[in-house]
Amino acid sequence: MHFLKVLLIGLGLTFMFPSFAELSPKELLKDYEMPVGYSEPKQLIAHALIEEGVGVLIDCRTKEEYENGHIEGAINLDSEVITADMLKQYAPDESTPILIYCRSGRRAGIVGKDLVKSGYKHVLNFGGINTWPYGLIQD
């Protein structure tokens, strides 16, 4: 009887507080297959990839936007000037996954599709930091 009570309380807490049930980045990515070409993964997947150090993280907003808050580890390459040649210094191998974001995802979508046309094999636009729930840092 005591075991059943503990089990029910544990299950109740898991559903009341979903953070108890969160998977680690490794667990989340266990069955994940890197898509080929341009894709738009959920931010949960993007966060797991970032936490696991997969690929190169690009913030394609302006320098001012970047300085006001960005995802830790992001490289700022403004969407107005970024080219595949500029990206080569950070990702010389075109099979390196490129994780890209902006404020809302629109600019990142344009840049991401251009990067695929330029030869990059895995470009993941996970949208914008206006919906990023994992925190930002400032320079």
Image (cartoon, grey):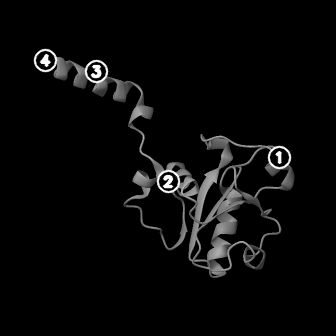
Return the disc, 3 or 2, that comes first in the chain's sequence. Answer: 3
Residue for badge 2: 45
Question: Residue 15: which numbered mark, if any?
Answer: none
| Contact? badges 1 and 3 (CB < 8 Å) | no
Q: Looking at numbered disc 3 in the image, what kind of residue is underneath it? A: Ile
Q: Which residue is mark 3?
A: 9
Indicate which disc, 2 or 1, sits on the residue closer to the N terminus.
Answer: 2
Q: How would you rate the neighbour count of disc 4 (Cα within 10 Å): few for under 14, some for 14-19, many for 20 or more?
A: few
| Mark closest to the chain's N terminus, 1 or 3 | 3
Label 1 crowd bin: few (<14), some (14–19), many (20+), radius 10 Å: few
Amino acid type indicated by mark 1: Asp
The label nearer to you, 3 versus 2, is 3
Q: Amino acid at mark 4?
A: Met
| C-alpha separation, residue under disc 4 versus residue under disc 2 | 40 Å
Q: Nearer the viewer, mark 1 or mark 4?
A: 4
Q: Up-down: is 48 above or below 3?
A: below
Tell me, yes or no, whether the two marked residues, 4 and 2, touch with CB atoms within 8 Å: no
Task: Tell me which residue sits at (55%, 51%) in the image.
Answer: 47
Say the numbered circle drawn on residue 139.
1
Q: Secondary structure at mark 1?
A: loop
**Element type at mark 2:** helix
For label 4, the residue is: 1
In space, the residues marked 3 and 2 are separated at their CA atoms by: 30 Å
Nearest to viewer (mark 2 / mark 1): 1
| Residue 39, image x, y percentages | 53, 65
